[in-house]
């Protein structure tokens, strides 16, 4: 994995705003030593970014990360590094689901998000989750399609879902990825039901917590040949986020750090190229820098549109 750098212009603009807010909020107690006038923006540019790594040192014994100093020459606050087994960047449905699954395996998990944990693309999703829910377990315990639905052209099946998805993507999709998504979709919906997402059920068309998969109301949307869209009225994303955040905050193995903007992934050389061992961040409220050191890092930030911000 190579070192990823976010849009420099975006980071600088966010850092300047965070620094100005920090100066306003802490001027009374003198907590921060901030540059004045035009020097403020200059202090947050290239030299400070490059000096961030120099502000830390790695102990030769046990690989422990220690702070060389609490503040660099420009007076920026440095917060003590945080170590964990798994670092997750992003607090959408993917990041929070990964956090819960890892935490259940007794891993120490840290979730870093650039805003409030509820804020993100997931909560604005309205339609629902497409999954073929007519499945059952065979004697071997493997989820399989009901064979009679395969023979019945009117019945839904995973293979139909796969073809619908490939057709909607003009067959430019990665077929293997599509097959995995369609095959594992039902189990993911059952997981969401288990954690308390109030999906709409049959008959009443109302949202009921801990819905049983067989009682779910299935909608039909564009691109689908069958009714297979599981939804929570027309606020599916918000309902999923609410349930996931409640579970994440209750889990003793998960810590959430909000309003932390990721600057760089920390990488070290290896025979295979590079190994990621954490991330450097900036607190958008105070302007303080913090390093998160981890055995494994998951980038669940979404935001493909930010690849080409201009």
Image: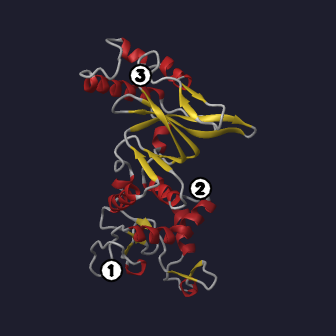
The residue positioned 34% from the left and 45% from the top of the image is: 116
Furthest residue toward bottom: 148
In percent of width and height, residue 255 lies at 43, 49
**Earlier residue among tags 2 and 1:** 2
Protein image colouring:
secondary structure
What residue is pinned by disc 3? 76
Instruction: Work out whether residue 275 can be spotted.
Output: yes
The residue positioned 76% from the left and 38% from the top of the image is: 271
- Quarter of the image where the N terminus is located: top right
In percent of width and height, residue 288 lies at 40, 29
Estimate how packed mark 2 is, as few (under 14), some (14 to 19) or many (20 or more) residues with alpha carbons within 10 Å: few
In percent of width and height, residue 303 lies at 46, 44
What residue is pinned by disc 2? 172
Q: Nearer the viewer, residue 271 or 146?
A: 271
In percent of width and height, residue 79 lies at 44, 31
Horizontally, residue 90 falls left or right of residue 293, namely left
Would you place residue 132 above or below residue 102 in this image?
Answer: below
Mark 2 vs mark 1, foreground winner is 1
Estimate how packed mark 1 is, as few (under 14), some (14 to 19) or many (20 or more) residues with alpha carbons within 10 Å: few
Mark 3 vs mark 2, foreground winner is 3
SS at badge 1:
loop
The residue positioned 33% from the left and 77% from the top of the image is: 201
What residue is pinned by disc 1? 202
């Amino acid at each position: 994995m190579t070192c990823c750098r976010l849009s420099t212009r975006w980071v600088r603009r966010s850092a300047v705003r965070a620094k100005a807010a920090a100066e306003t909020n802490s001027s009374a107690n003198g907590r921060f030593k901030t540059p004045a006038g035009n020097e403020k923006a200059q202090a947050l540019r290239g030299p400070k970014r490059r000096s961030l790594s120099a502000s830390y040192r790695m102990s030769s014994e046990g690989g422990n990360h220690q702070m060389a100093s609490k503040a660099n020459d420009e007076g920026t606050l440095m917060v003590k590094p945080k170590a964990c087994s798994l670092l997750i960047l992003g607090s959408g449905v993917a990041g929070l689901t990964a956090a819960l699954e890892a935490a259940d395996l007794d891993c120490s998990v840290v979730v870093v998000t650039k805003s409030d944990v509820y804020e993100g693309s997931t909560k604005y999703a309205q339609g629902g989750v497409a999954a073929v829910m007519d499945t059952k377990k065979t004697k071997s315990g493997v989820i399989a399609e009901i064979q009679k639905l395969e023979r019945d052209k009117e019945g839904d099946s995973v293979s139909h879902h796969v073809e619908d998805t490939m057709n909607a993507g003009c067959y430019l999709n990665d077929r293997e990825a599509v097959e995995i998504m369609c095959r594992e979709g039902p189990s993911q919906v059952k997981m969401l039901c288990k954690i308390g997402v109030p999906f709409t059920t049959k008959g009443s068309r109302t949202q009921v917590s801990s819905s049983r998969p067989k009682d779910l109301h299935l909608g039909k949307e564009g691109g689908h040949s069958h009714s297979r869209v599981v939804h929570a009225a027309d606020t599916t994303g918000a309902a999923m986020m609410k349930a996931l955040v409640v579970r994440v905050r209750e889990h003793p193995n998960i810590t959430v750090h909000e309003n932390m903007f990721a600057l760089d992934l920390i990488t070290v050389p290896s025979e295979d190229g590079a190994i990621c061992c954490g991330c450097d961040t900036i607190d958008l409220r105070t302007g303080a820098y913090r390093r998160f050191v981890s055995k494994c890092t998951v980038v669940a930030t979404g935001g493909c549109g930010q690849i080409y911000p201009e």
